[in-house]
Amino acid sequence: MFKGIRPKNKSYTDVFISPLLDKLSDNSNLIEVNQLNIVFEINNDNPNSKFLLDPFSWSEFLTSLHSRRNTTPGLDDYPYIVIKNLDVSAQQLFLNILNLLWSNKSIPQSWKTQCVVPILKPDKCPEFDSSYRPISLSSCLGKIFENMVKVRLDWYVESKCFIPHIQYGFRRGRSSADSFTSLISDLKNAKHRKLNTVCVFLDVQSAFDSVDPGILVQIMSRLGVPGHLCKWIFNFLNNRAIYARHNNILYGPKCASRGTMQGATLSPLLYNIYTSEICKYVNNRNVNILQFADDIVLYSSNYNLEIAIDNMNKSLFQLLQYYNYCLHLKINPSKSSVMFFGNEASNSNIIYNNEIINRVTSKKFLGIILDPKLTFEEHIKYISKNAHRGLNVIRSLCGVTWGADPKILSILYKSIVRSHLDYSSLAYMNSSHVNKLDILQNKALRIISGAICSTPIRAMEVETKVMPLILRRILLAERYCLKLIASNNTQVINKIIPYIDRSPRRPLTTAQGLICGNSPTMSDIFLEIDNSFSKVRKQCPWPCYSFSYQCISHPINVVQQTINNNSEMLQFLEENTMYYVIYTDGSKASNYVHAALYDPQAKFSSSFILHEPCSIFTAEAYAVYQALMRIREINNIKYFLIISDSLSLITALTTLTVKFKSNYILYFIKQIIQQYHNNNIQIFFLWVPSHKGISGNEMADKTAYEGVNAVDVRNTMNVPMSDYLQCIEYSKFVVRNVEERSRYERKMVWKHTSRLTCKTLVSSYARCSSRLYYYHK
């Protein structure tokens, strides 16, 4: 797309290009490469990190390639689709080239070249470079290489817990919700205890563009990263070529050696590593720190506001020593701000680098506007304004006799309107101003359904299959609480649980409260989920970081043979007599979940009783796990064939990567397969279609269905988080014990069925105010 671009005479609109390129290529006060020779030579034989230097495998290459979306290429004009459409032999040749570059710890200069496209910010003067947001385009070939390095390095620093728990940005299993939930929970707890809180929001000036590669590799070396990888990282960031394209004119190049590459998959991880030692320098117990990438907030609570301010100033001085003198990062006090929460007032100032930080009465943090009373009134007005823009788009697409289908409008509403309401719902769910959002959704439903003004709201919700916002907020909160429980994230859990004791059997809300729009508190929802889903697998770190990287990347042998009936199966086994065959299957019904295996050589079959919330996928995976365990009892056999009718399971095993939502049983399976491989025992998988009369598969299916030789493993096996998420999705909102006071009779109450269709229950409820209802678990 950049072919044929020729330089032209500068116009008055291009005066910002030169300052912009100069700012992006500021290379002053950097550590010289000759000072890093020691760093490049140590840790190369470290047994804990030596795998980082291994050649990349075929499975790593395919995972990196297929994870890339088709985006605009760099100046070399090679998009991802070029590599994806190559023949397998050509892709293997490309992988060999990558491994050759990896062994030499070098990277082509064209892969370090970026084209910056400046985008003018809203309501900014076009003649100043600060008015533009630079968007960088990089080589897609280099991003494939870079992503493989990133996956390895990410697994290493996360499995060793080198990134502090206060950093929530760009990490698997962590999100902005963890950060703002922690902050808001601490502020509410302090308010409940009548404490005064001072909260400082800091702005790091050009954080990613200010990273010193020399300091970065020194920090990585202290974390045990091999010197050869540190050298590759340094070469990757050093001597980059930067161009700028504006009005179809290409300017440059300029040489850049400071900062990380914008848009590079490695950049967020490298910045997290760069600031990973913050807790060593800012260590005041009375001051809490939260980070989300380059966003930093410090807050301190105390009965005496002056003491809290004094603690804050001490921590800011420690932060100054760390950021300015250790990392060469600058915090801009003029763009930073401080907020006070509580009843006390103070004239004392918060100071950073001898400059007073401005006081504000409201502050946007990760997209959420905080106010001193935590009413979230201003934030709800803000998201209502953004949602109304999407609502206007829906209005323009519908009419009385023309327009989009209501189903399309409903999908569009969920995408461009309700998404604004969902993001921060964990923060404002107990606000007294949420009824304004209900009015906004009601307007959207009238537009979608074409209903008149007198149409009941519940009828429109049923017709459009859009649940009430209060149920939506509870649903999102339950998903979030389940993730906290599964990850055993005690840092956040200890903040959202109140200091007073609450019974986990307490109803989430009353019928009257539900109709009035009063949401239960986050602590109530957490206690309910913790009690209902007590069998969930709890592990910290996530399972993807608890198993070795060699285990996760170990290839799976799949026999590419098409089997359609029993005769073809018998013929295949006759031609391949070296295999010891084991069939596996799973079965799930409304009141049981079974996994089963069948060994035709020994005429042995067995089934295993799992927890009822387990999915059929988990049952199939557990059956394979038990088949691998049975192989340990078989001697003098080197080739085993596990036959399963679950194509999704075999696909998941072959494509398993570092993902926190992956079923933990898959990692156990790959670990056992790797152990067998090290003992010269080969495990192969074969997929066969179910219910085709294949004798072994039918026997395994019968064993699972009837529970033959059943072994109850519910005491030793936990339910994966993904299975419980389905329970929340499909059956959490079945209302039971629905009984209200007489003035709320004949109100329509939601029943959330397994197909996500909404039905109304219109009946005369018993006039018993003492009995409440809550959601079925």
Image: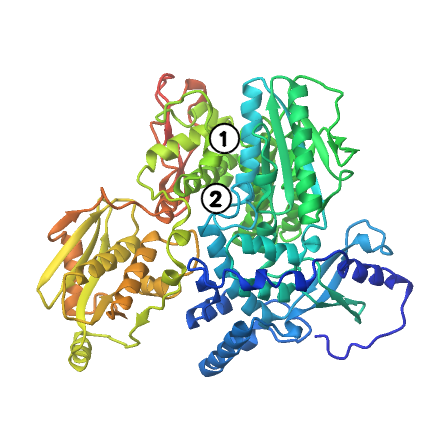
For the residue carrying disc 1, how many other residues have a C-alpha within 10 Å: few (<14), some (14-19), or many (20+)?
A: some
Task: Please state the horizontal and vertical placement of residue 57, each as a whole percent of the image.
Answer: 43, 71
Which mark, residue 416? Answer: none
Report the residue at 28% width, 68% height from top.
677
Q: Quadrant of residue 637?
A: bottom left
Question: Which amino acid, mark 1?
Answer: Lys
Residue 228 drawn above or below residue 545: below
Q: List the residue tagged with mark 2.
A: 463
Q: Quadrant of the C terminus?
A: top left
Report the residue at 43% width, 73% height from top.
58
Residue 713 drawn above or below residue 686: above
Q: Secondary structure at mark 1?
A: helix
What scheme was used to colour the molecule? rainbow
Q: List the residue tagged with mark 1.
A: 495
Task: Please state the horizontal and vertical placement of residue 725, each as a whole percent of the image.
Answer: 39, 45
Give the mark nearest the N terminus, 2 or 1: 2
Front-most of residues 451 and 407: 407
Q: Quadrant of residue 730?
A: top left
Say whether residue 344 is visible. Answer: yes
Front-most of residues 13 and 754: 13
